[in-house]
């Protein structure tokens, strides 16, 4: 009688462990990690990196506007997901200094992507200020600090 009870407990524990592993597998990210590609790029010489960047730009230029927008949407979703993960760590209080810097950088990038300048491909107001400033310098006849 004790052995059957022991076997039932062991069976229940095995079933429970299997269910937990199944749940963890379902929560695992579907996308493969990009770190091997990063490591590969880090090992490249500057010339090889430039050639790869040129190749990727050409690939992006060959896309139709719809494909480009779909790709941007994928990038934006990936960016928002990473920001959410870092914000979650921030609320838990387990965010390191590097991750804090990364979070700020990603939030700035997201802000840039959602701005009107990014979507319309117009130069940013900051760029216009720089242009105007250089034009005004050319127009001045007297030096500013006299």
Image (spheres, rainbow, N blue to C red):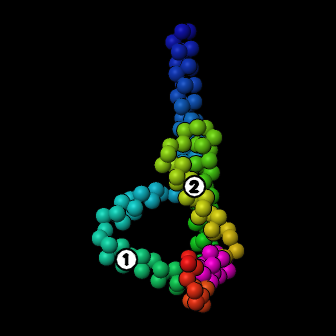
Q: Is residue 44 inside the magenta stretch?
A: no
Image depth: mark 1 or mark 2 in front: 2
Whether residue 82 is visible to the viewer of this picture, yes or no, is: no
Q: Quadrant of residue 115?
A: bottom right
Tell me which segment is drawn in magenta: 118-134
Q: Position of residue 35 (x, y in %)?
A: 42, 57
- Which residue, given by chain and number where applicable, does mark 1 sit on? 50
Judge whether 79 appears above or below 28 on screen: below
Seen from the viewer's position, the closer of residues 118 and 16 is 118
Residue 46 appears left or right of 70: left
Q: Residues within 10 Å of mark 2 (few under 14, many from 20)?
A: few
Residue 99 x %, y % = 51, 49
For the point 62% across and 75% down, the residue is: 126
Answer yes or no: is residue 62 visible: yes
Q: Nearer the viewer, residue 78 or 123?
A: 123
Marks 1 and 2, how far apart at CA: 27 Å
Q: What's the residue at 47%, 80% (across, down)? A: 57
- Image quarter where the N terminus lies is top right
Q: Position of residue 114 (x, y in %)?
A: 67, 68
**Element carrying mark 1:** helix
SS state under label 2: helix
**Which residue does the numbered mark 2 point to in the structure image?**
104
The answer to which image quadrant residue 79 occupies is bottom right
Counting labels gives 2
**Predominant SS of the magenta segment:** helix
The quadrant the C terminus occupies is: bottom right
């Amino acid at each position: 009688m004790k052995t059957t009870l022991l076997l039932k407990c062991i069976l229940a524990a095995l079933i429970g462990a299997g269910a937990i592993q199944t749940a963890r597998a379902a929560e695992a990210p579907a996308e493969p990690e990009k770190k091997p590609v990063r490591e590969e790029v880090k090992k490249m010489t500057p010339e090889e990196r430039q050639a790869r960047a040129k190749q990727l730009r050409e690939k992006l230029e060959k896309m139709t506007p719809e494909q480009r927008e779909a790709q941007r949407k994928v990038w934006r979703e990936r960016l928002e997901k990473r920001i959410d993960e870092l914000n979650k760590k921030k609320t838990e209080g387990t965010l390191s200094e590097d991750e804090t810097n990364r979070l700020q950088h990603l939030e700035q990038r997201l802000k840039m992507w959602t701005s009107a300048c990014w979507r319309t491909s117009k130069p940013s107001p900051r760029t216009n200020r720089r242009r105007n400033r250089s034009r005004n310098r050319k127009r001045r006849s007297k030096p500013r600090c006299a």
